[in-house]
Image (cartoon, rainbow, N blue to C red):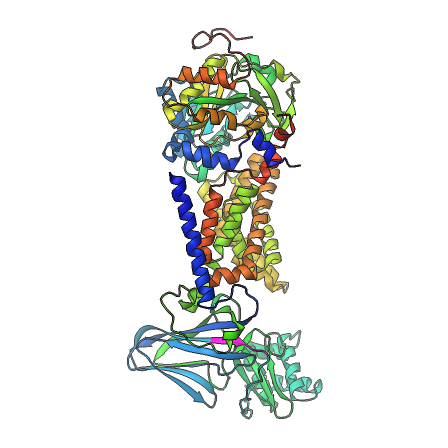
Amino acid sequence: MPRTSFYVLVGVLLAVGLAMTLHRHLVMEVPLLPGEEREVWEVEAVVTFQAQGDPVKASLAIPASPPGFRLLTESTASTGYGLNYLDEEGGRRAQWTKRRATGTQQLYYAAQFLVAPGDPPPPPIPPRPPRTVVWESPLGAAAKEVLDQARQRSADPLSLARELASRLADPGDDENVQLLAKRFDAPDLLVRLLHQAGISARTVEGLRLRDSRRRQSTETWVTVHDAEAGRLLINPRDGSTGRPEDLLLWGTGHAPLLEVEGGKDSRVLYSMIQRSIPASSAMQDQLREESLLDFSIHSLPLGEQALFKNILLIPVGALMVVLLRILVGIQTSGTFMPVLIALAFMQTTLTTGLIAFVLIVGTGLLIRNYLSRLNLLLVARVSAVIITVILIISLYSLLAYRLGVNQGLVITFFPTIILSWTIERMSILWEEEGAWEVLIQGSGSLLTAVLAYLAMSEPLVRHLSFNFLGVQLILMAVVLLLGSYTGYRLSELHRFRHLGEERG
Amino acid sequence: MLVRPRRLLARGVIGMNRRNVHYVGRYNDRRLYPLVDDKLRTKLLAREHGVTTPELIGVVRSQFEVKQVADRVAGRSGFAVKPAKGSGGKGLLVIDRQEDGRYLKPSGAEVTRKDLQRHLSNILSGLYSLGGAPDAAVIEELIRFDHGFADFTYEGVPDIRVIVFRGYPVMAMMRLPTAASDGKANLHQGAVGVGLDLTDGRALRGVQFGRPRTDHPDTGRGLDDLKVPYWETLLNLAAGCYEFTGLGFLGTDLVLDRHHGPMLLELNARPGLAIQVANGQGLRGPLDLVEGLPEGRPVHERVAFSRERLGHAPVPAPERRAGAPEAVPG
């Protein structure tokens, strides 16, 4: 009987899933709960360049003891290259060398950083005396003017630096600053002005830590030194000072971040991922030999891990859809559209995401209403809706940016094609069944998306799904069981209410 | 406002999950779905098996043919345009009559030739078909419903839905269009559902929007007076659909045409559950009874079984054998 084999399958899935989970918990000592843990960031830098067929020497600044973090482990991967860690006066560097190389080259450097805000600050890197600054003719006067004004409104080197930074970040109608800003990047300009004032300062590269991001670049910050008052880190883009908790200082600033000899078009991009490790092993973590039995996502390269961290959450969202449709009987527009919307919410945060979604779909429906009068063929009309959605997204992003709401930019995380189909379907639904039905299905989809988002962003769920692959098998078993549920849906208890009231 | 699941279970009400897993999933082979999902195929197949369906005026398969439609329907008093792969009455356009090149809907609203062509073009591009697949438009003779139902409908054609399980009719209802449903026969849009006694086609009770109802909301005619004529022919027609589709769990939609008698309108491999509300009873009892029966009995025996065991009234004397009715029943 097929029923028997079905329950055997479900049983096997459950058993294997549980066994894998327990193995990882008991043998690998991965805790089941996300609590009592230390936060660890794994960061991977990928250096890419085009080799010219000559000897290649590539060197990348790497952090030794960035403030607020502790370097746990590091590793590199680059076939055929010789590798040296250099401890130079300007900081640590990883240097790759090869006699001959042609074509695209990729060099990897990966490191684990423990978040350690309590650690004593690293020994200061000796500042260099300020350089002599030479300005071109009209700029010199402007620089002098700006400096003089800032000097009057400050008391010491650090407050002068603060004053300059905030003035550069928000020039207002100061023509001198505007003139200078046209010629120099904000970090360079700040450093030049400080040097001219006789203050030691330099640019430094910092990496914003954002979970599961790939292909990120560093931001340039400025450090200011003063023999008496100490050091100060300045964000030249908005004039704010002090190191944010999520900023990992990558280079020291005495030497360029990346230097490549024998190659062109060189660049470095970062992938990063947040992990929790047990407090006990955080202190003594080292590169362990990964056994074959360790079916763990952690053995993948970091970029792939970051991708998987989100992919592994999709089954959780799918389970929510299954629960809501089979047990509750909620109506959604498109079966798994809510999961994709929920994934977008993960990138945008809930409130922004909801507002963005309603704005885009609402505007899209209005425009689609006009398109329907043009008497177009279906494929052309949906394509027109896709282009419209892209225009709406661009428009809202621009508008939000102009208004200073940076969150407007996150609208781009919404899957365009899915949104377009949603608009098309809702529009047809509107024409045929009326606005009420659109409201029911639309709010059903959004409710499902919100619940899926809440489940997927729950720290315990994220911890379990990422650290225990066996959980996926357990989810599978539950979904299969739900698929054979023949009882009533919650909505049917309402739909058939009159049938129950009458006499039997 | 929820009912306890135990009450529903006691009444034999089945839910969507049970329908999907236990009946649709088990008794309807997926390979057979195209037979019923494509109304054109259903129609041709039904004709082959001697099952009456509305006369086919023409099929439009390409944009090229859209422009010639006016010629095809010329001289017809009324016709209906529907997508071959549509569902739930979506994309149905009914033209009641033509007056000097203008098309008029039953409500009297005018449809221009351009409107008609756009509708056909929408159908072809798959606007109404499942999953948006390219589709064909079927144009068929308009059904002139039996005069006996004039008081029981508003603008649209009332139809009769019979659930056929393994070839046995297990439950029947009539769907009466109302002003609220805009002349459509869909219960969730506000049409009145009337449960029918399987024995003799007499009305059992009526519901609208899930609430009991004793008269037609627009005409005020009491539903107690409703009795479907040619009942035995109708059930034979419905039960016969099992033979030519092979689908074990089937919703058959039939109409009574005033000239041609009972006709098959369309089939549904995933019939809805509103019929339980219209009948005031669950499907579970009849389905369980039929599930235990042997295979291979002829149509009229299955119909006789259903009328005797699943109906409420004593079985009347057999009708004269089916054929097109000569006179209009009173």
Magenta stretch: helix, strand or loop mostly: strand
Residue A154 lies, in percent from the top left, at 70, 86
Q: Is residue A466 left or right of residue A245?
A: left
The foreground one among A78 and B196 is: B196
Q: How many marks?
A: 0
Q: Is residue A492 above or below residue A277?
A: above
Q: Quadrant of the N terminus of chain A?
A: top left
Residue at point 60%, 45% (across, down): A443
Q: Is residue A443 above or below residue B38?
A: below
Q: Quadrant of the C terminus of chain A?
A: top right
Residue B273 lies, in percent from the top left, at 53, 30
Residue at point 48%, 27% (across, down): B288
- The answer to whether residue B262 is seen in the rendering is no
Residue B249 lies, in percent from the top left, at 44, 29
The foreground one among B289 and A273 is: B289
Q: Is residue A286 above or below residue B316?
A: below
Q: Is residue A61 above or below residue B20?
A: below
Residue A378 lies, in percent from the top left, at 46, 41
- The magenta segment is A112-117
Q: Is residue A153 left or right of residue A312?
A: right
- The answer to whether residue A46 is seen in the rendering is yes
On whether residue A114 falls in the magenta region, the answer is: yes
